[in-house]
Amino acid sequence: MNLEECEKNPFGLYEIKEGDTAISICAEHGILLRELMRANGLEHLPGRGGIVKIPKPEGEVYVVSAGETIKSICEKFNMREDEFCRRNGCDYIYPTQRVLVRFGAK
C-alpha cells in the first residue's frame, strides 16, 4: 500500500489554520463540537498551528429541518429517543442544528 491508497488523514490529526473556528472544523469533518472538545480535553480551541485530534463520529451528521421533532427524527433513523438524546446531549432540537443519527439508517 502506498500513501495514495490510504484514507485522508489516517492519523486523525488536524493543524489549525488562520480563521479556523471550532465550529468550522467540526463542519468540515462532520463531527459535533462536544466530540471535538472531549476528544482533545479542551475548553477552548488552540490558536493557529495547534494540533487537534479529529475523532471518528459516533454516527452520521444530520441537519434538523423546520417542523422536525426528536420523535420524527428517531422514526426516520430507527432510533429510540433516549439513544438520540444520549448521542446528542440534548433534550430538544431546533432547525439547522447538526445532530448525530445512526449510520446508514433512513
Image: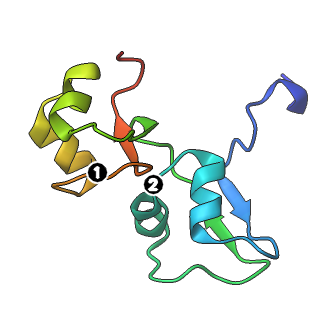
Mark number, residue 5: none
Residue appearing at x 73%, y 31% in the figure: 7
- Horizontal side of 56 relative to 75 (left or right) equals right
Q: Nearer the viewer, residue 35 or 74?
A: 74
Looking at the picture, does residue 5 appear above or below residue 85? above
Q: Residue 73 location, x and y as percent?
A: 26, 31
Residue appearing at x 46%, y 42% in the figure: 57
Q: Residue 60 location, x and y as percent?
A: 44, 33
Residue furthest out toward the front: 67
| Residue position marked by numbered label 2 in the rendering | 32
Q: Residues within 10 Å of mark 1 (few under 14, many from 20)?
A: some
Q: How many marks?
A: 2
| Residue position marked by numbered label 1 in the rendering | 88
Q: Nearer the viewer, residue 12 or 93?
A: 93
Q: Residue 23 location, x and y as percent?
A: 57, 64
Tell me if residue 53 can be seen.
no
